[in-house]
Image: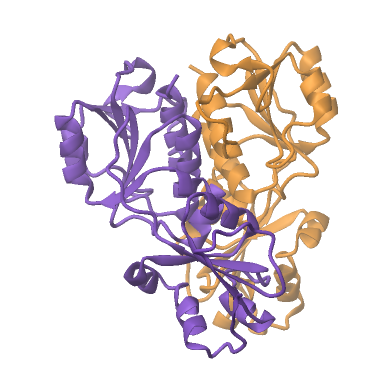
Chain colours: A orange, B purple
Amino acid sequence: MPTIIESTQNMRIKMFAKMKDKRYRDEWRTFLVDNEHLIQEALKANLVKALLYVDSHPFKLDPKIEEIKVTEAIMEKLSSTSSTAKYVALCKYMPDKEITGNRIIILDDVQDPGNVGTIIRSAISFGFDGVILSKNGVDLYNDKLIRSTQGALFHLPVKRCDVLPEVRRLKSEGYYIVGTALVNGCGLSNIMEREKMAIVMGNEGSGVSSTILMMSDINAFIEMENFESLNVGVAAGILMYTFRKK
Amino acid sequence: MPTIIESTQNMRIKMFAKMKDKRYRDEWRTFLVDNEHLIQEALKANLVKALLYVDSHPFKLDPKIEEIKVTEAIMEKLSSTSSTAKYVALCKYMPDKEITGNRIIILDDVQDPGNVGTIIRSAISFGFDGVILSKNGVDLYNDKLIRSTQGALFHLPVKRCDVLPEVRRLKSEGYYIVGTALVNGCGLSNIMEREKMAIVMGNEGSGVSSTILMMSDINAFIEMENFESLNVGVAAGILMYTFRKK
């Protein structure tokens, strides 16, 4: 039998609404998803703890997942977009995973949620094994980020941490670290593929940090006819396609 | 001497404010730009007809450009974003140009302003000579699109028209037309570069129209490890990098 909640002032509903705020999400390691396709992807990834709906829902739920029947007004309060969601899933954060495998992408303070979402989709397409994100970059559970990955995010190993110790670890494990720079370094088409590679993309404004550019095995630039900075999602896509898993 | 306007109810100010609406922009072939960097770019491209400001402005203006001194309230009324702009430039539409040169990108109903903006930046980077946009696609003077190109838009030949007659024209002029598809067709890395190429990118949901896929010389797919659709801006970037001008 579902739990029934009818007041927008209910304590749990108030807590759920607070999860629009990153501080609360991080404290509780919990986030909301309110789009049918994204909820399906979160269910596949075993992240859903409770499902809120008004009349009925189309999902097959494990009995461990709590069902909560609520009102339209509550749905409106919890919806992330201007239109009221039909379902809202309460999800737990993905566990931080040690990132291994032959292809790794590292995001050194990439800030825009749409860019990070796009990079995650490309990473999956090109067979990358995981993403390492710096702590100062975008919030991984930002609503726009999740939507722009179309749920792909839930299926890729992700680790959020200080990037420098990770770069050191990867170097000691024999990874070939490819930094990216607008100038200097080596033209992408001249870089040989290696068995184990980690590609580092930098902040939209300032690029990859100079420490990492120094520690990397090589720094790549994307050959251009006119000097015009590329969108970081496009640049990452070109690098990941070049070194895709085959 | 500048024109001075102090009322938000002034007839010209009301007309300027209407330019937030595509219908009026298209009717008058005129649009507003309210970011300092974008105004500089519009000035370089000779598009500015009048400049509105409150106290003073940092621009070097040709005497043909009207200067209009206005109030904070008027600026607020004309600003595109939540913060009040310091300057607003009234600009004329770019003239439609016949697109020639060895590298052309065709956007067949690409809808998202951010995607089109990103593609325009990449097109300039990789030495493409112009962009052909279908009439059903995004509005070229959409505020988000202009901002996402950072003004690069003003410097690339663009033609907005029915795409099919253009594809026919390009074929008769000896262009090698590369359609894009998720499956079927030829892996990108197996496609030979030609002297004159036109690449067609399709709508975010439905892809390139079947008529164009039939008329093209070859249809390319981007080789992937996992089947996951790429963002159209990333896909366009990979194709344009592959066939960049060298």
Q: Is residue B237 visible?
A: yes
**Which quadrant, please, contains the N terminus of chain B?**
bottom right
Using the image, determine if residue B148 lies above or below residue B89: above
**Which quadrant, please, contains the C terminus of chain B?**
top left
Using the image, determine if residue A102 lies above or below residue B231: above
Q: Which of these two is toward me, B55 or A42?
A: B55
Relative to residue A127, is residue A18 drawn left or right?
Answer: right
- The residue drawn where x is 50% and y is 26% is A225
- The residue drawn where x is 77% and y is 53% is A29
* Labels in figure, total: 0
- The residue drawn where x is 49% and y is 84% is B14
Q: Which of these two is toward me, A219 or A161?
A: A219
Say which quarter of the image contains residue B187.
top left
Please provide percent x and percent y for residue B115.
47, 48
Q: Which of these two is toward me, B155 or A240?
A: B155
Say which quarter of the image contains residue B167.
top left
Please provide percent x and percent y for residue A57.
47, 66
Please provide percent x and percent y for residue B169.
17, 37
Using the image, determine if residue B19 lies above or below residue B33: below
Please provide percent x and percent y for residue A12.
74, 73
Q: Is residue A39 visible?
A: no
